[in-house]
Image (cartoon, rainbow, N blue to C red):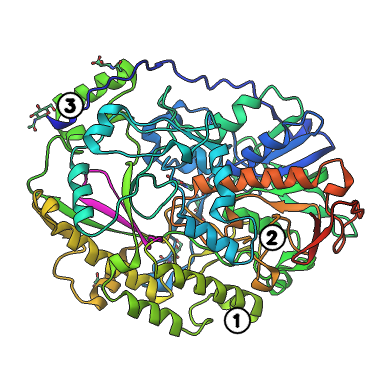
Amino acid sequence: MAGLAVLLALASVAVAYPALHLEARQISAQEARASYDYVIAGGGQAGLVIANRLSEDPSKTVLVVEYGHLNTDPAQEEPSSATAYKQHLLYNVTSTVQPGLNGRGNLTVYAAAVVGGGSTINGMMLDRGAPDDYDNWAKLGNPGWAFKDLLPYFKKATSLTPPIPELQREFGITYDLTAYGKNSPVHLSFPTYQWPAVKVQYQGMLQAGVKPQKEGALNAYGLFWFPGALDPVTVTRSYAVSGYYRPVTARKNLDLLTGARVNEITFDKSKRATGVTFQARTADGLGIEDRVQTVKATREVVLTSGFLHTPQILQRSGLGPAELLRRAKIPVLVDLPGVGSNFQDHAVASTNFRFDTDVTPNPTFLTENATFKAWADELWAANRTGPRSMTVGNVGSWIPLSVLASDYKNILKTISSQKVSEYLPSNYAGSSALLEGYKAQRKLLTNSFSRLTTGVIELPFAGRGTSSLSLEHPLSRGTVMLDPKNKYAEPIVDYNTFVNPVDALVIARAYGFVRRWMKTPAMQTLSPVEVLPGSQLTTDAELVETARNVTRPSTMHGSGTAAMAPRKYGGVVAPDLLVYGVSGLSVGDVSIIPLVPGAHTCATVYAVAEKAADLIKARTRDVPFLGQCGGAGYTGSTVCKAPHKCRSLGDRKSVV
Ligand SMILES: Cc1cc2nc3c(=O)[nH]c(=O)nc-3n(C[C@H](O)[C@H](O)[C@H](O)COP(=O)(O)OP(=O)(O)OC[C@H]3O[C@@H](n4cnc5c(N)ncnc54)[C@H](O)[C@@H]3O)c2cc1C
Ligand SMILES: *[C@@H]1O[C@H](CO)[C@@H](O)[C@H](O)[C@H]1NC(C)=O
Ligand SMILES: *[C@@H]1O[C@H](CO)[C@@H](O)[C@H](O)[C@H]1NC(C)=O
Ligand SMILES: *[C@@H]1O[C@H](CO)[C@@H](O)[C@H](O)[C@H]1NC(C)=O
Ligand SMILES: *[C@@H]1O[C@H](CO)[C@@H](O)[C@H](O)[C@H]1NC(C)=O
Ligand SMILES: *[C@@H]1O[C@H](CO)[C@@H](O)[C@H](O)[C@H]1NC(C)=O
């Protein structure tokens, strides 16, 4: 039996369970000090990274305010947690009606509500975007954010343990350790088992014209293997809590306040952020206590409340689209039309083929074959090896448009011929900055679509006949806006999925690609029979209609709602991550992403947060001339001592 050949020769595997008893820095609302150097709003994935780095200096005090609690359920660290999302660790939010999805509405919005955020509950799939993706961030007017600039931060956050030699040989798994750090906080690895059909699927992808990569972490396009966020020693989830929080729970200068909601950022007369207001949640978790508390930040307030709440906190604080703020009766501090716009996620459709001559063992064995199941359970119990160590899979294709669609040139022409404002959310019409920004994005995307170095569809495979088809670089843009009737209610989430018809057409082409893949000699050995979408559906109109009927708007990669871009492009933060129009306030989470990368967002958030921490440390050092040196409302040092010079950065100045 092919799978059994992968016999597991790990040198030593620690079976010990990682302790969940923390020597926590956890405090209650009553215990919070009046003032800290830094206040971080949101103890999710990015918040914990930034808290760790800022508290490295014992003379600086750091407070993290997190709505959720520390997870204490050991099951959440098991590989199986990668596919079992827990409602109580998520916010309870659904979308508006989606016209691009044939009027479906109430679609689940996935946002984590627990310490560690998305990294605590996610699918543990740890891939990076292609160099092109980040280079486009830089080209949009964000110097310092190209792939070469981010690579050191990807390495600082993640290290890789290669797959066991038997798996490498049998499956031809390749990797490049130079893409990773050594002993970085987050440990990536591969499970000790793969389904044998993966070899067939991989060959089929090659035959369908997808080019392989030695290491996707350096070249995330074409066909490549990727690791999971799985500690190779304990075979448990490696995430912001294990990598960035637990190792520093002895630091006396770090406080983690859980079960408290940040309401607003407070400002002084010069529009410098001075702290935040917050309210504790009630003990039953269902409500909020009456008492509103304030905590001061003497150096910086850092927003890391995720794509859903970072824009909401900004809007509640008077930073956002003036028209919305007026409707909500919130005084406008800074008219920032981009707050809550530019919302992107990866919409996902799927196909299903029955394999009439499937190889054995296959994934059904884990539920249907008692002998196999007993073997898998025995390995797992003995030393945490075997099929139970798998998460969501480790290989897939990121298919360039020209490989996906023979008529790709027509698709590019269609994009260029579209009126810029045509398919955008209604609030874009009132903002020339948002329209200009989208126009610049569209130009960058169209260029990328014409190259082989960007995948437009992600198609991972793990030995099953079902495939998810994720739209990696949507043209449609959505919004996340506070509810003007109740600014403390959950925000209103409009994905706007497939409102630009090209997005739905790309999914239609992906259905066609899957059919071509199934017809390759390799895949024909499995005798695939189409179940979904159904071989009777053949025309563009039918496939587009199917896509609109079945696509889910999210793969939980919500991003872009406080985008880093020049202010003339509707940006919310500058390349130094400081919010426009005020001082002492930055954003360091998934919201700053201007263009969603063609990847699951976790690895990117680690790199963004690591870089954010470096930027914050540099500008809030005690040496005056290394801080900011001016700009609207800045009350800190205005001294620029030689050899340093003032440099304009958007509407601010900083020191070089
Ligand atoms: C279910 C799920 C599965 C996913 N699967 C994958 C995957 O397999 N691979 C991958 O790469 N990515 C995956 N992602 C995406 C990835 O995990 C996220 O993009 C990433 O974790 C976002 O990090 P963040 O720090 O920006 O936000 P988060 O980690 O979401 O952190 C935001 C934090 O702020 C807190 N907060 C919000 N509002 C307030 C407030 N008012 N006051 C105080 N605190 C507040 C929240 O409770 C939360 O803890 C998944 C995400 C989810 C939700
Ligand atoms: C794990 O346990 C199995 C079953 O007892 C055994 O066959 C295998 O050699 C062990 N592997 C390692 C790496 O210890
Ligand atoms: C989620 O919100 C809906 C209304 O928006 C409510 O009916 C439901 O009870 C909530 N569920 C939970 C678990 O809080
Ligand atoms: C969404 O849910 C609400 C409340 O349950 C319901 O009234 C509405 O019809 C639903 N909308 C759609 C499009 O499903
Ligand atoms: C069940 O699994 C065992 C061990 O993998 C294998 O030998 C056997 O052939 C399988 N049975 C069936 C019916 O496939
Ligand atoms: C799409 O959904 C609508 C409404 O449910 C249905 O009438 C139509 O047949 C579906 N079309 C396809 C191609 O699935």
The nearer-to-camera label among 1 and 2 is 2
Is 533 situated left or right of 491 in this image? left
Is 563 situated left or right of 406 in this image? right
The nearer-to-camera label among 3 and 1 is 3
Query: In front here: 571 or 425?
Result: 571
Estimate the spatial distance between the alpha carbons at disc 2 and disc 3, rounded to whole Å.
53 Å
Mark 3 Cα shell of 10 Å, populated few (<14), some (14-19), many (≥20)? few
Mark 2: amino acid: Val
Asked which secondary structure carries label 1, the reply is helix
Residue drawn at the location 21% of the way across and 63% of the way down: 533
Marker disc for residue 620: none
- Label 1 belongs to which residue? 429
Q: Give the image location of residue 241, x and y in percent.
A: 56, 32
Mark 1: amino acid: Ala
* Residue 295 is inside the magenta segment: no
Quadrant that contains the N terminus: top left
- Label 3 belongs to which residue? 5
From this view, report whether residue 201 is shown above or below residue 427: above
Residue drawn at the location 44% of the way across and 61% of the way down: 106
